[in-house]
Image (spheres, rainbow, N blue to C red):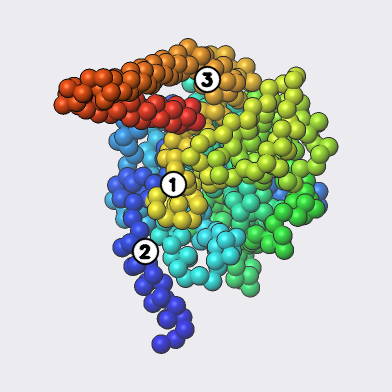
Amino acid sequence: MSRQEENGSNNIHWSNIIKILLKGSNYKKMKGVKHLPEGSGSYLVGCLDIMTERNGQDKNGSFFRLYYPTGLATNNSTNNKDIELPSTPSSGASSPSSEPDDPQEQLYKMNSKNNEETSCPRWPKWLPKPRYRDGYMHFLGKENSTFYNCLFDWFGGEVYVPALWDAPLLPQEICNQFPVIVFSHGLGGIRTTYSTVCLDLSSQGFIVAALEHRDGSASATYYLNRYSSVDPLKSSSRSSTEDSSPDDNQPSSPTSQVYEEEWKIFERYDTWDDFMVRNAQLQQRTEECIKVLDILCKINDGLELDNLEPSQVDLNDFKNRMNMLWVCVAGHSFGGATAVATLAKDKRFKVGVVLDGWMLPLDDNVYPCVTQPVLMVNTETFQWKKNILSMKKLESKDVERVIITIRGTCHQSSTDFQFLFNKFVGRIMKARYTLSPKLAVELTGKAMQGFIWKHLGFTDKDYQKFIISGNIFSFLFCFFFLFPFFFFLYFLNFFSFVSSFLYFSFFSFFLFLHFFIFPPFFLFFPFFLYFFYFSLFVSFLFFLFCFFFSLFFLRKC
């Protein structure tokens, strides 16, 4: 048997073991297709990729996924009743009689004026290309592990994102303009790592641009190098005139251009917390966030944008649909530090959100330059004293800075990984903690939405004030309910304990009388004495129970 065949048989062997032993991931299944949770808001979500070309002034270009509202969600949509499985278009056209190229493809029939050949967008895969799997494995240091590669393929290889690929923007008659969020990923992330959070925000009425950084912190990314004609000598080139492969997962539009993919994987360093290295990456990340906002402004002004990623969406539909006075920057981990640095450098960003931020890459001179409101949402297991002290440097009397911690969460509770793995595997791989992944995302989303709505002036939004407006609710709850309740319990315990002690003292005295003065009562007294001994013991146990229950309940609150 050749080495290649042997490796193939090993892959099959591990795949079978994994399929048998590891079941029950947290993603949903609809008609046999695994997908991440849908957004909780009132809008259906569309998405597309935007990549700009590198040139002399811009050595890295920009690459991001854009999430946006595309339609109104109905009650049936939450039950997946209006999601259908029409056939895959062979060349951009849909044909009900044709056989699908991929039986797991998801197509959505748009009930719009453009319900024609090109109006059947499909759900994109969470893993846009197989090379991204290799990037994740390289980031984890498991690129040579057959077991981990099969594990990732089984749990994450065929998961779909419930966003409508290349869908049109929501008509202007329904909603005129949308606020904008630029989202920065953490170490080892890519533009789809936070699909659940971004999709949920978009379903609430935000346009979200999820970056794929090119500073070496992404697990993998790629450039598209353009050629004016087909060069048969370039074997790695792909022509945009041909249909995109299933791995590309997106339809193409005919042009005369040919592209070559140039991949860049995660850059490893001797120490992950080298300030000089991470600070240099932070500077590039900040510029990339600002560059994305510049691109969105260009689109919003109706200027032509040369998008290297094939798309059927007319970007002119986004003209004057984004309110550039309502712009927020958010990020997770390294992306949280990127959000803070971006706030300090570009005041067009009005609000910042830091999800479990990793503050090491930030210079001390950055903190005083941040004048915008900032929300910091931390997890229970990730933070440490030095990192929290760095966050405390953002405290200000002039503008609201809020730090909250969601109990039962870990560092990956903002990512999609918590949905890919079941509870057992997720705990082993530290992809989730004790809190339900759905609840973790819901709490994070409510906190983000409430804080952003509040500081962008959305007075008509029913945001969760008790989450983002300090501890007044907790104080009132404790003052008017917990304190009287526990005072009553302690008073009852104290009364019971003192009463039992008095009873014990009284019958001890009675015992003295029994032995020395009234011996005939000997036959009747022990029963009463043992009863009050038992009463004293029960009272003491009740006292301990209330004491520890109080501590436990207050800790939970």
**The disc labelled 2 sits on which kind of residue?**
Ile
Query: Residue 474 bears which disc, if any?
Result: 3
Residue at 76% over, 26% down: 371
* Distance Cα–Cα, label 3 vs label 1: 31 Å
Q: Residue furthest bottom?
A: 1
Q: Are marks 1 and 2 in contact (CB under 8 Å)?
A: no
For residue 283, say whether it is visible.
Answer: yes
- Residue found farthest to the right: 365
Nearest to viewer (mark 3 / mark 1): 3
Q: Position of residue 446 (x, y in %)?
A: 51, 28
Question: Does 329 sit above or below residue 56?
Answer: above
Q: Identify the residue position indicated by label 1 in the image.
A: 419
What residue is pinned by disc 2? 18
Q: Position of residue 477 (x, y in %)?
A: 48, 16
Q: Is residue 461 left or right of residue 72?
A: right
x, y (%) of residue 174?
48, 21
| Residue 314 visible somewhere in the drawing | no
